[in-house]
Amino acid sequence: MASPASVAGGGEDSNGSSSLIDPLLVSRTSSIGGAERKAAAGGGGGAKGKHWAAADKGERRAAKECGGEDGRRPLLFRSYRVKGSLLHPYRALIFARLIAVLLFFGWRIRHNNSDIMWFWTMSVAGDVWFGFSWLLNQLPKFNPVKTIPDLTALRQYCDLADGSYRLPGIDVFVTTADPIDEPVLYTMNCVLSILAADYPVDRSACYLSDDSGALILYEALVETAKFATLWVPFCRKHCIEPRSPESYFELEAPSYTGSAPEEFKNDSRIVHLEYDEFKVRLEALPETIRKRSDVYNSMKTDQGAPNATWMANGTQWPGTWIEPIENHRKGHHAGIVKVVLDYPIRGHNLSLKDSTGNNLNFNATDVRIPMLVYVSRGKNPNYDHNKKAGALNAQLRASALLSNAQFIINFDCDHYINNSQALRAAICFMLDQREGDNTAFVQFPQRFDNVDPKDRYGNHNRVFFDGTMLALNGLQGPSYLGTGCMFRRLALYGIDPPHWRQDNITPEASKFGNSILLLESVLEALNQDRFATPSPVNDIFVNELEMVVSASFDKETDWGKGVGYIYDIATEDIVTGFRIHGQGWRSMYCTMEHDAFCGTAPINLTERLHQIVRWSGGSLEMFFSHNNPLIGGRRLQPLQRVSYLNMTIYPVTSLFILLYAISPVMWLIPDEVYIQRPFTRYVVYLLVIILMIHMIGWLEIKWAGITWLDYWRNEQFFMIGSTSAYPTAVLHMVVNLLTKKGIHFRVTSKQTTADTNDKFADLYEMRWVPMLIPTMVVLVANIGAIGVAIGKTAVYMGVWTIAQKRHAAMGLLFNMWVMFLLYPFALAIMGRWAKRPIILVVLLPIIFVIVALLATASTMSAAAVTRRINAGGLRVEVTNGNGAAGVYAVAVAAPGSPTAKRVNDGGGKDDVWVAVDEADVSGASGGDGARPTLFRTYKVKGSILHPYRFLILVRLIAIVAFFAWRVRHKNRDGAWLWTMSMAGDVWFGFSWVLNQLPKLNPIKRVADLTALADRQQHGTSSGELPGVDVFVTTVDPVDEPILYTVNSILSILAADYPVDRYACYLSDDGGTLVHYEAMVEVAKFAELWVPFCRKHCVEPRAPESYFAMKTQAYRGGVAGELMGDRRRVRREYEEFKVRIDSLFSTIRKRSDAYNRAKNGKDDGENATWMADGTHWPGTWFEPAENHRKGQHAGIVQVLLNHPTSKPRFGLAASVDNPLDFSGVDVRLPMLVYISREKRPGYNHQKKAGAMNALLRVSALLSNAPFIINFDCDHYVNNSQAFRAPMCFMLDRRGGGDDVAFVQFPQRFDDSVAGDLAAVTACGYDLGTSWGRDAGWVYDIATEDVATGFRMHRQGWRSVYTSMEPAAFRGTAPINLTERLYQILRWSGGSLEMFFSHSNALLACRRLHPLQRIAYLNMSTYPIVTVFIFFYNLFPVMWLISEQYYIQQPFGEYLLYLVAIIAMIHVIGMFEVKWSGITLLDWCRNEQFYMIGSTGVYPTAVLYMALKLFTGKGIHFRLTSKQTTASSGDKFADLYTVRWVPLLIPTIVVLAVNVGAVGVAVGKAAAWGLLTEQGRFAVLGMVFNVWILALLYPFALGIMGQWGKRPAVLFVATVMAVAAVAIMYAAFGAPYQAELSGVAASLGKAASLTGPSG
């Protein structure tokens, strides 16, 4: 039967050619309408067509001359190229810009002059990348081609006279994932437009894929099938356009092109009413299904049966249920294939009477409807569902069994057919005689009908669809864009194009899956059967259908790799097109004046950016996969490869754009900063290059036929994406490479206007997500930069030179350009106020003025301060309000002064150390402006060092000789024991070498504070000293007493360092109000304590330690006032301590009062309240959700703000102020309280996480170049401590700039609001380099060692320095159990480091060889303790009745051991000598190493083994420090026994060795000392006694309070040894003698009988 819309023939002129305005797409009956007829064929016809010229005149002339008698198919599309008058200038401009870019690069390299060289380097790298990416984008555009389908020729060829068709079959795929995010009404309109398309009904079929498996979509499809029996004939009868009812009925006055105008009005009214009822039924479906299911479920007999979801026919729905259960929930349900409308040839279609109660006159209209199938692929949690690609492949297989059409076209569910001729248009390219057989797919441009008129977020994307795609059409063809694309089925099957294809291809089950019917359908497709009779739909066939859509069918096949749509990537469309192009196929781009398809775009900014993140992230995934354009696609044309390379790497450009966009923050720097000098020429270069880009863009606009608004919106949204979506995609890709987790697939929610009269309501809704933060920062930075620039101009206009004014204008121009590009974003964040853009226009100048006023005030204030150097010290003149100047003298330590002397006596013991840098020191005059020599270097004198090294070499030789001797004298009595001991000795030797090699060249470096003071004195200002941020970390106010913490803070605030150059940050990982209010009290008391310390040069500056000292040497300048001041300050400190101690009760009482007042009774929420009457955002006394340990908000509170650079002097003594601080600077450093956010779902990374949070917060607040960190139980013991490390950091020699950190020895007394919230958030670290390549290292118990290692392997060096008095002192755990737990964490963390990416063996070449060995020793030393523990248990062999030797000859073995052990101790004596420690220090180290080796270290090895098997790390246990608050004994904790399993192994070793000594004594007594057995017993006993001596501190530790009397231990040990000896003599010796007698008798008998006996 003929189509209801027959098409006219002819269209060529007398010359055999056609112009762009020929009606190739217009029917005889003008079905498209008069407006479209003008340029239906042109796709750019009319005015747009003037830039295009026909490129196929010769081909068309030849085809006309042959008249088609050769049997070949006709020419079915027209080709046009850009006219030379436009194309040649376009290409010339591209070439000219390429030369300009190269010249620009060369100029920048020759003029590598910048104020910030690192930024210059980054900008050059960015410019190179910009040039490279621009070239990748531009090269494929050299030959744009426009191809227009010739529908007239197609109808002449395919519409036969008998009413039949030569058209091939088409399967149409529609995919949907969720009936909520993708409204059902959109989907059903899409299906209706497909069913009503102008294509033979028996040649097309529609497949709907429902990835949610919801009954609502199936029943909606049934309703659609019923309504289609009315809608489809109506469209055919009246030639309706468009054929989506929702879009059609929205038209105000649709033009009529049908053949029955007199019936149209009545028919339209009836159909409209039916459509409204159809929509009502669709909206009621969820409730209808629920009510029906409730009725069926109420009738079930088994009350325990689940509540199923029921279909209308009374059967249970096999997909997802309303009340999900196993096998009936999202992600887990059976596959479903249901034929809603069967093939028209079977006559199984619904009739019009069945579907509606209205009888319209369709006598002359074909009422048949194409096949309609519902598909929901099976899903199982055990299988990857592969998102949209998996759904499309399931449709592909199901359609192969049902219809097996030669061609396939797919749609997203929010698209519909806008031009009923669209399917025929695509077929024109597939059947053309030129490239038809080699064409794999035909891509249509995407058009959207819900976009706001001004297209704020560039949804139309005309630059891409009408520019880039036409350019690719001149190469191998456009890429596949995910929707609106017709495929050749064979190309999707991975079959090569005809000119590359092998003969006799046989489908294989390993490739296509184990389905006979599917393999047969592939064979039919290979034979290109035009139309095959459909298979009967019986039970066997249905089972086969369900199998090919099951979750496991893809398993171990080529689906998703070489067959079908590609898996494991977020942008399956691009990579699928790439695979097909790589096989040699080409593609075509089809444009139609009356758009072929229309859809819905996300007009909400957040949804739009989420869509861009997925696209750009998928592009990057493609680059880092086997589909990389550089290595994939063997038959890809060169420029096509370039275009794909550009598609995969373009998001990387955004990193440099973001860097440039933030650069205007340099306006905030007081001085002029230039990224490139000469700056003017640099800006001119940039302007020329940028201008050339836009000139090229203008030519593209001309030939692409787009508007300036389209081009401008593309530029604006690219900037918005480059500061938000694209960097996020790059970050996702980095995470993907590190964790192997792909880009998260998020269904883009489209707008719905069901609840609002505003069609563009979503445009004005702001949904904040973290992705928007960088764009917001860029916007604020540029707004602030403009304001500051205006302010600076107001201040300096009369001072600036012409060049400076020009530079300011150029910088301001850049800021304004960024602002214009971010204009849509600025409107977006305004929300509904954006409906009135005038508000933004008014608001911005107001903000500029405010910022300018603030900048002006700040600049003028800074300009009022002048600095100059005075001979007596540093003088800072501060102009006060009266014009008078106050002078503040900063004390400088002169050579020979006590301060300088005590730090500068670095050599200390001249009999050990000798200076090695005399030449450097004497040659450092400083006159050349270079930094002076700020530290002294000392080496051990040769008289000690050479014997020390020689002894190490001798012991190494002795160890090798010992190993060789043991191998030659292998023990035959106990081979297993000998093997174990041999392995232990080898490991002992190896670990000793690792420990000893780094000690071959000890160096002592001592800070020269005198030189630093001289540098400061001869500099320009006190600002010569760089900034320092001081970090203090605490976790728990109970285990880490608050008094320790506050003393640490007070000592830091009182340090001798310029107050405006450092800041103190306290991290409270417990989030307790006690810590915060303690810091408030500290800030108050510091106003007295810090000036007191400065006035009297107090040392140390922790008040608890200072007042605990009996006598102090006075170094101040007003000794007469010291006693009175000290007495008053001490009284204030005692009151301060009382307030600190009472904080717990104070806060609790206050909270109880507030809670009673708030709740009225005690059953409400009991919050913890701050003093200002607000809830504490951290942890509460009575934990609640979001207010408990491990779950609370982040908190940043600035308690003391950053001081000004002007000194502020205190008041003279008075009645109210008894202390005279008139000559003392009373400013305090900045003090900040931080408690990072914690949530249960995040790994908080213990101390390293807290340190990194401190690092980020300090970067926003003070951003000092140097950082020093303390545990809360440490304090500054030497006020010069902060100056000392500066000596190393600022030293003139090469090491200064290469020093990453300065480590001090540990000494112990006992032995920006939104940004701040963001950087303390628990999720801030996710997906970043924090904890790996930035900050302190995560996922390891010893973050300190791992962090130092990371810096060292990057090439940094570090310095170890000591001071007299010690720089810092702290509190150590003197309780045995707490000490052991501390060692357990350290040793376990060391092992974790070895089994991580921080392994010293894997570090890069920047790590010094011996430094690598040192780190290797640090990470493996606990392993040696396994063998030590093994050796320590050897004495149990004394309990064996017979003699048992680990090595024979035993005496020689013992001599070797004694010699080797003695050499260790001799080497140790040399180390004691040059390190300046005492023998007691060395002995205690040996003893505790033995204690650790018998308990802690083996436990750490065990933990590490468990981690390797279970993946669980070392448990972090906070080390409790001693507290003397409840005891008069300072060392009370020393005598407290806390029994833990960790003590058991050492107790066993202790008991075994005590018992062994007793047995040895018993044996010696029984056998006699002169016998061989007696001598060996005594020698063995020496080993046991040595172990007991090493375990002596442990024995005292487990004695508890009895440990105060060591004599008790000696008496008890002797008694235990005597008891064991007596028991052995009583019971063991007779048995041993009896065995010996038996042995002797047996020997005598053997001698009498002889060999024969």
Image (cartoon, grey):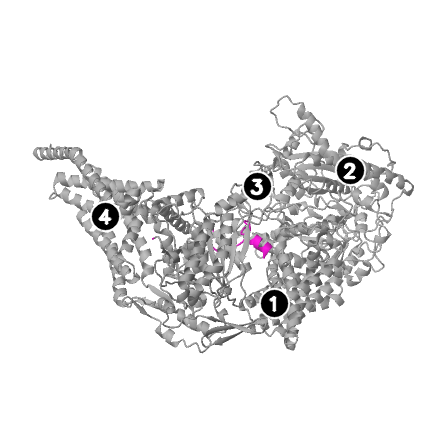
Q: Earlier in the sequence, mark 4 or mark 3?
A: 3
- Circles 4 and 3: CB atoms closer than 8 Å: no
Q: Judging from the image, what secondary structure is the residue with disc 4 in?
A: helix
> In percent of the image, x 37 and y 49: which residue is there?
1373
**Which residue is under mark 1?**
858
Q: Which residue is found at the position 65% from the left and 61% from the top?
A: 137
Q: Quadrant of the N terminus?
A: top right
The residue to which callout 2 is attached is: 279
Callout in the foreground (4, 1): 1
The amino acid sitting under disc 2 is Lys
Q: Nearer the viewer, residue 1265 or 961?
A: 1265
Using a 10 Å C-alpha cutoff, classify the residue at mark 2 as few (fewer than 14 neighbours), some (14 to 19) or many (20 or more).
Answer: some
Q: From the viewer's perspective, is the residue at label 2 or at label 4 nearer? A: 4
Residue farthest along the top direction in this orientation: 301
User: Looking at the picture, how far across and down is residue 838, in whole percent?
Assistant: 75, 59
Residue 25 disc label: none
Sequence-first tag of 1 and 2: 2
Q: Main secondary structure of the magenta part?
A: loop
Quadrant of residue 453 in the image? bottom right
Is residue 242 part of the magenta span, yes or no?
no
Give the foreground label among 2 and 3: 3
Give the Cα separation between the discs numbered 4 and 1. Answer: 72 Å
* Residue located farthest toward the front when viewing the structure as drawn: 1215
Q: Which mark is residue 1586?
A: 4
Measure how far apart labels 1 and 3 are at the Cα level.
45 Å
Q: Earlier in the sequence, mark 4 or mark 1?
A: 1
